[in-house]
């Protein structure tokens, strides 16, 4: 049973790293876009891909990886905020506040359909992506005790 859990966790970490790589690709591309009201269709498409990839990686990290680590560490599940706070205490994320912002933004992305607020979301995603991307290496390092 424990070997099965380890193998599933390794697959989850692999998915997380792939999601990071594809978000990094979009982030690098979108960082060069001048965020004005006159975005081209191609720029809009790239920014939409960025927000989708941002959401996907944040979900993988917060909803799956953080939860799995808590299970391995025998921590009570609690709320999403509890999970994020434990991640900061364990040292595999730098700031719980930043990850709470990431989670709030992920929810905004999922529920926002107004064109006038989408530019604000794009700017926030560009601002928070580095923290999300950087956390993957720390999570992988912390997780080595469960994958060896």
Image (cartoon, helix red, strand yellow):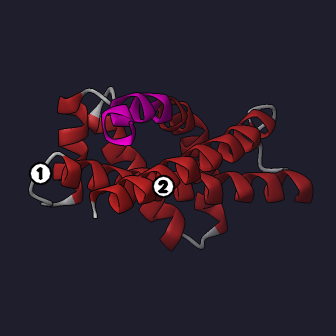
Q: Nearer the viewer, residue 48 or 66?
A: 66
What residue do we see at 41% from left, 28% from top? Answer: 141
Percent x, y of residue 143: 36, 37
96 vs 40, left or right, is: left
Which residue is labeled 1 in the image?
74
Tell me where the magenta segment starts and ends, as one range.
135-148
Q: Is residue 145 magenta?
A: yes
What residue do we see at 66% from left, 45% from top? Answer: 23
- Mark 2 in CB contact with mark 1 (< 8 angstroms): no
Label at residue 85: none
Say which quadrant the N terminus sits in.
Answer: bottom left
Percent x, y of residue 18: 64, 48
Relative to 124, is 118 above or below? below
What residue do we see at 42% from left, 50% from top? Answer: 61
Say which quadrant the C terminus sits in.
Answer: top left
Q: Is residue 36 magenta?
A: no
Magenta part, dominant SS: helix
Visible in this render: residue 42? yes
Give the SS element for disc 1.
Answer: loop
What residue do we see at 38% from left, 33% from top? Answer: 144
Q: Earlier in the sequence, mark 2 or mark 1?
A: 2
C-alpha separation, residue under disc 2 versus residue under disc 1: 18 Å
111 vs 6, left or right, is: right
Give the SS element for disc 2.
Answer: helix
Q: Nearer the viewer, residue 38 or 79?
A: 79
Relative to 56, is 88 above or below? above
Percent x, y of residue 126: 61, 38
Label at residue 12: 2
Quarter holding residue 146: top left
């Amino acid at each position: 049973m424990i070997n099965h859990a380890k193998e599933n966790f390794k697959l989850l970490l692999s998915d997380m790293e792939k999601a990071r790589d594809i978000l990094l690709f979009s982030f690098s591309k979108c960082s060069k876009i001048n965020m004005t009201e006159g975005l081209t269709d191609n720029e809009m498409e790239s920014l939409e891909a960025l927000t989708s990839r941002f959401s996907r990686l944040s979900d993988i990290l917060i909803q799956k990886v953080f939860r799995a680590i808590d299970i391995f560490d025998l921590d009570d599940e609690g709320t999403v905020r509890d999970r994020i706070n434990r991640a900061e205490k364990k040292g595999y994320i730098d700031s719980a506040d930043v990850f709470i912002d990431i989670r709030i933004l992920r929810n905004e992305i999922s529920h926002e359909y107004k064109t006038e607020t989408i530019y604000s979301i794009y700017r926030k995603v560009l601002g928070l992506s580095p923290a999300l991307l950087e956390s993957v290496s720390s999570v992988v390092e912390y997780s080595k005790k469960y994958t060896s």
